[in-house]
Amino acid sequence: MSEFGVYVHIPFCRHRCDYCAFATWTDRDHLMVEYVDAVVLDIQRSVAAGMPVADTVFFGGGTPTRLAPELVTKIVAAIPMSPDAEVTVECNPDDVTPDLMKVYAAGGVNRVSIGVQAMVGHVLASLGRTHDPSNVEKAVHAAREAGITSINLDLIYGVHGESLEDWQSTLTAAIALAPTHVSAYGLTVEAGTPLADDPARHPDDDDQADKYIMTDDMLGAAGMHNYEISNWAFGGHECRHNKVYWSQGNYKGFGCASHSHQDGRRFWNVRTPDRYIACVNEGISVEAADEVLDEETRAREALELSLRTADGVPVGALDVASLEGLVSVQGNRVVLTRNGKLLANEVSLRLKPR
Ligand code: SF4
C-alpha cells in the first residue's frame, strides 16, 4: 500500500525562465497572503471531508521561497500528517537565508530541494537564471545549520552552450556539497515557451546521453544509487513523495493548477491563482476537469512507471524479447539497462504487457 501525498503549488516567481511551462506568474505577488489563506481553507475543507493523514508533503512551484517562510509553515500546520512525514520545500538558492531555514525547520519542514540547475555561470545565464552559484553553497549550509539534513539538489543538463566539462564542473561542485539526493533532468523543450521558438538553442540527444552517462558514473562513484532514471540518492534518502507518484498512489493537490489522483481518477484544479482564490472564497469546487483511467491504461502506466525505477517489474509482467538490450533480468525482476534508461521513451513504445 502506497503512502498518501499532499502537493501544494506556489505559483509565484521573480521572473519567467524561458524554458519553463509551469503554471507560475511574475505579476501576482500582491495575491500571496490571500492565496495562502485560500489554500489553508481548501485543506481544512478537504480534511473535514475525510482526507487521509499525509505521509509526504511537497511544496513546488513556481517558487515556494518567494513566500514569507511563515506563510509556508502556516500551510504545513494546516495539513494533518503522520509523525514521520516527509515535508519538502523547493527552494531558490537566492531566497534562502539562515532565518528562512530556521522558520522552516521549526514549522516542520524536514527536507529541501534546492533549484541549482547548474554551477557554471554562463550555463545559468543561458538558462535565463540569475542566481550566483555560491548561493547554492550558502543555502545548503543554512539548511544544515537549521537541522534540515535531507537535501536534494535539482540539476538540468543539456543547456545550449554547456560543454561536457561544464557539466562535469556542475556535478563535481554538487557532489562536494554532500547532498543526500540529486535529481538531474535533461532540458526539455516545452511548447509555447520562448525556448521552443529558438531551435538553435534546442538540446542535442547525443550530448544529453553523454551527460546522463557522466551523471550516473559520477554520482554512482560518490556512493549514490540511481533509484529512478533521473534520481539518485544515498540509501534511506529516496524521495518518498516521488515514490507516491511512481507507485500510482493517491495524492491530493492544493493550490492552482495542482493535480490529484484517487484510485484511478485524476483531477486538476483551475489554472490561475485569481480563479483558485475566487473559487475557494465562493465555496465552489476548485476542480477544473478530471479523467478516469480504465484498468488497461492503469496497468500499462504501472508497468512504465515501475520500469523506470531500480526495482523494475516482476519477470513475466512483460514481453522481454521485445526489449532486447534495453532490459535485463535480475533475479525475479526485469530492470532497465543503461541503454534502456537512455531510451526510456523507446521502451515505453515497445512495451508489451503480458
Ligand atoms: S523559477 Fe522555476 S517555476 Fe519559476 S519560471 Fe523559472 S523554471 Fe519556472
Image (tube, helix red, strand yellow):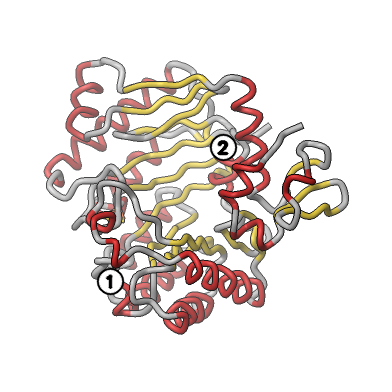
Q: Going by the image, does 291 lie left or right of 300?
A: left
Closest to the camera, between mark 1 and mark 2, is 1
State the residue position of label 2.
82
Residue type at the position of mark 2: Ser
Give the x, y percent position of residue 98: 34, 67
Classify residue 82 by image quadrant: top right
Residue located 28% across and 76% down the image? 132
Residue located 40% across and 41% down the image? 76
Classify residue 105 by image quadrant: bottom left
Vertical comparison of 106 with 130: above or below: above
Badge 2 density bin: few <14, some 14–19, many ≥20, Cα 10 Å: few
The numbered mark, 1 or 2, whose residue comes first in the sequence reads 2
Which quadrant, please, contains the C terminus? top right
Classify the position of ligand 1 by quadrant: top left, top right, bottom left or bottom right: bottom left
**Mark 2 CB lies closer than 8 A to ligand 1:** no
Residue type at the position of mark 1: Ser
Residue located 74% across and 53% down the image? 327
In the rendering, which numbered label is found on residue 126?
1
Give the x, y percent position of residue 295: 63, 21
Q: Nearer the viewer, residue 284 or 161?
A: 161
In the rendering, which numbered label is found on residue 323?
none
Q: Going by the image, does 319 lie left or right of 38?
A: right
Residue located 59% across and 71% down the image? 213
Give the x, y percent position of residue 152: 49, 62
Classify residue 223 by image quadrant: bottom right
Which quadrant, please, contains the N terminus? top right
Q: Nearer the viewer, residue 205 or 309?
A: 205
Disc 1/disc 2 C-alpha distance (Å): 42 Å
Vertical comparison of 54 with 217: above or below: above
Vertical comparison of 311 with 158: above or below: above
